[in-house]
Amino acid sequence: MELRAKDPNALVTASYSDCIQLAACGSKETLPMNPDLPADLFTCCLTTPIEIAIRFFVLQNPLPSNLTVEQAMKIPGRLQERRTPLGELNWIFTAITDTIAWNTLPRPLFKKLFRQDLMVAALFRNFLLSQRIMRVHQCHPISSPPLPETHHHPLWQSWDLAVEMVLAQLAALNRAADGGPAYEYQHSGFFTEQLTAFEVYLSQGAIDRKPPDQLPIVLQVLLSQVHRLRALILLSKFLDLGPWAVNLALSIGIFPYVLKLLQSAAQELKPVMVFIWARILAVDASCQADLLKDNGYSYFIQILSPASGIPVGNASEHRAMCAFILAMFCRGFHQGQVVCMPPNVMGACLAHLGDENPLLRQWACLCLSQLWHDYAEAKWQGIREGAHLRLCELATDNVPEVRAAVLYALTSFFGIPEMSEEVAKIERDVAGSLLIMTADGSNMVRKELVIFLSMFVKRNEGKFLVAAFEQMVQERDNLTAEGANGSADRKDTLGAISPNTIFSAIWQALLMFSVDPFPEVGQAAQIVVDYVHLALLQSSLGQHTQDIIEEISRANLRNFSLTLPTNSIPESKRPMALGYANGETTPTNSAPAAPKTLKGNWLANGSAERSPEWNRPPDANDPQSSSTSYHTAKEPITRNFHAKGVDKVPSIPLKSQFMEWSIEYFREPQMKPNEADEPGSVDYNQRLWRRTRNDRIIIDTQTQKERASTSRWDHNKGVFNNGSLPMRLLFHQFESHLIAVDEKDSVSVWDWAKGVKTNHFSNGNPTGTKITEIKFLNEDDVALLMTGSGEGVVRIYRNYENDGEVELVSSWRALTDLLPSRRSSGLVAEWQQGRGTMLVGGDVRVIRVWDAPREMCMSDIPARSGSCITSLTSEQVAGNIFVAGFGDGAVRIYDRRLAPRDSMVKVWKEHKAWIVKAHMQRGGMRELVSGSATGEVKLWDIRMDSPVRGFLAHTKGMRSLSVHEHAPIIATGSTWHDVKLWNTSTPKDLSLSTIKPYSSFLHQNRSNPVTGLAFHPHRMMVACSGAGDNHISLYNCDSKGGI
């Protein structure tokens, strides 16, 4: 029309792109003239395919037979009735031609010709038959769009077999119809055989993702009640392979079949139907209108109801799938939200919040969130039913995914348009009850909490502007007082801030989150803080706020310039420059003030008097190295972290990705075992190899134990230049990895067998703190590296040995009350591999028990001491008994089987100084060894009140101690640059060897203490390092000790 409007004389030709054309033969071919065939064979193929196919089979049958064409045409039954012989043949023909087309045609062409119109689909199925029949008579049917040749497809042989089986029974059927002997028709085994073939395909795992030939046949089988359940089960297994399988099934036309089956009341179909629909909606959520049209959604509401029964063992898991289906039905679909309200979907979800299955609890929360999203009426209904109160009860759920789902649901719950006093109070109460989650160990939960708080800030923006402004005023006053008086007493300034409200508490939580050790959490909180600060600068208080910010900046610079760095003072004058005389240092919370003199009043047995000087960290007076600085190496980040642009304007509320992340669960295979548990898989073979390697190392090192207790340990294995001062050393049990951390934040990974440094990265702890703990997690398999630093933060790394691949797995503040200080023990930890728990202590009054699978603190065990915890160790079999060493020399035993307040079962106070280390052997005799800063070493039996054995290892003080895990050997490092090795199985107090860590020519100060000391857990090998030098020395008990 447009062309005719522009030029009336233009020749307009019709477009034939959407036309379908079928022809019997090519331009140079002649139609068949066989009298046994119809005159128009091609038309008969298109209109009466079953009759022509049977006639063709009889005429082409090479075997002798008495059956005539006329007799073959008398097959009993009707085409529409699948249980009759003729109807079954028609059903098989439809399945076979559909499958041939599916396996031969391109996907778009198949969808166009076989799925968009029933008449066209039937016509082209019959056209495939004509290709086969006409070819025998030297004719090649032609079509537009063109179809490839299909006459050679192997499924035509299955069709011939089906026809032959029917014709073989034809005589008996006819005799029975004429009054002869009764005969029961034997149905074709075609569909059963094809389902078996499909089952074989699934059993192979579909590794190469090749589409199964039988998929269209499986869809046809769904029409039969006899095979329906088996077909649905096999179909569910196929959909479980992943999104590619779901898309394949949808492209072939599965949707109308499973949609129609929602009208079935068969109980046995419910579990498998729920599973199939969960997989479909996880990949394609565009079928919400179809579920609404015929009330298909009610099928899942009925199963979700706690009163309904479902014939399956894991009913909770299937109800979780129903909650997921209804959540996807309501997601972004207002009509879905409306129709789900009357059947009380909300009540069913609330009833399931107490279910034992965490997946059901999680998806009950997420289903509520989708019901509430931008739907005020549903939120009011939630208020009437107390839904927010029920959700707040799950803030301490054992499963982190459930806690995150609670926060996601409550974020959707906020936002009722009319901000009445009732709504405001409810939102304040909810926000206040969730502040307990600020100390959650899960990064995912903390991030969702920040997103939740961003919604609360947006709803109460004005109040948070006031809270932020008053916090700035408080910070300015504190800094001003600190600069004037040398210290700021916070108690004097607390009266200056506004009364404590939920808004100020949440603002403080957001400020804390803005420096969260996990990058995604910290960045999210920074966006919220930046948004409030920007709004404050643009408000009527903007100029006043700007003045306060400038005052804070000037005060920070002034206080920084007044601070005298200790490493710039000569060592001989350092105590006096800091205001103390004769080596006196600043007292800490865990030790009384030092006396004016530190004369060593030694007793006859060589032990020191109980002097408060020995109750401070041994490294308190170490010279600070100026050769390294903080954050010089690359700091590992999480896999999916993307830093926001500096020029990006902050906006709130933040958007959560938790729903998308949760949906991924239903896109992953659930029926087959994990890749690592699948025999023959790469992960399985790697794990098997590691297990064999580990066993070989353990067996090979057993014979070295006897030599280790008698041989000298002065065989030098190697010397490595670490590049920075090694303060702590750690061997991997089975890999040839040696971890070294310096006095700041650097972590170095060495391959001691090759003598090369494989990785070097920054731990990211703040300036002024250091790494105080390093441990390996999951050493038997793929190990993770855990670090603990002085500010109370635990970080866990994956691929720690590979430069460029190392990534942060998790990080959290394990000790929230620990203040960074050089005069405390920092964070000390003990990892219990068997229980998956981590014991954490330090300069705090409790020992915190963190559960790794739950990612939360399970209990706080009172330390029952006013001194800081310096060392933690535990027995690794049951993990109930653990031991803590303290800064005042006490060693305490705890039993986790008792109530926390009664957990301490024994205390030893034989030591009179800082406990350098307490360690319980994993193997060997399971010795419990403790050593103090005075040089005393004691061996204990937890059943006794006094030590089994004790000796003085060093007369001038001891700096480090290490215990071999399986051999009766301990190593002690003195404050005078020597390491002694001792045999704990002999009563003699004579050392086996004395070795000295390597020092370069420029660092020949033999008075430097031994800072790093560690045994290899299995091999007879020890690593050591001294202060003032960057080298690590490795020694064996003999030339075979390191095999």
Image (tube, rainbow, N blue to C red):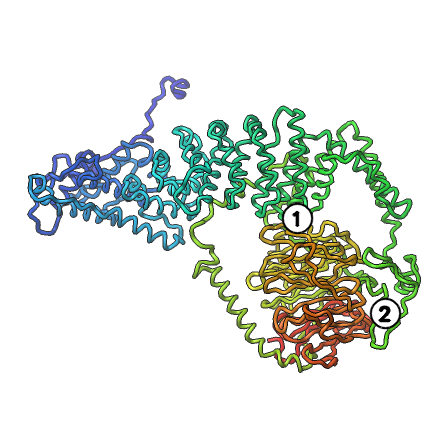
How far from the left and from the top, in percent, is residue 193? 26, 50
Residue ID for mark 2:
609
Residue name at image x 44 percent, y 58 percent: 678
- SS at circle 1: loop
Q: Amino acid at mark 1?
A: Phe
Q: Which residue is mark 1?
A: 518
Asked if residue 1013 lies left or right of residue 69, the reply is right
Look at the numbered disc 2 and give the secondary structure of its residue. loop
**In the image: residue 445, left or right of residue 597:** left
Q: Residue 546: in sight, yes or no?
A: yes
Whichever of labels 1 and 2 marks the residue nearer the N terminus, that label is 1
Mark 1 burial class by Cα count in 10 Å: few <14, some 14-19, many 20+: many
- Where residue 226 sits: x, y (%)? 27, 43
Give the quarter of the figure containing the N terminus.
top left
Q: CA distance from mark 1 to mark 2?
A: 45 Å
When the figure is inspected, residue 174 is found, relative to residue 879, above or below; the finding is: above
* 1041 sits to left or right of 208: right
Q: Position of residue 457 (x, y in %)?
A: 68, 33
What amino acid is labelled 2 in the image?
Glu
Q: Residues within 10 Å of mark 2 (few under 14, many from 20)?
A: some
Residue at image coords 17%, 43%? 138
User: For the C terminus, which image quadrant?
Assistant: bottom right
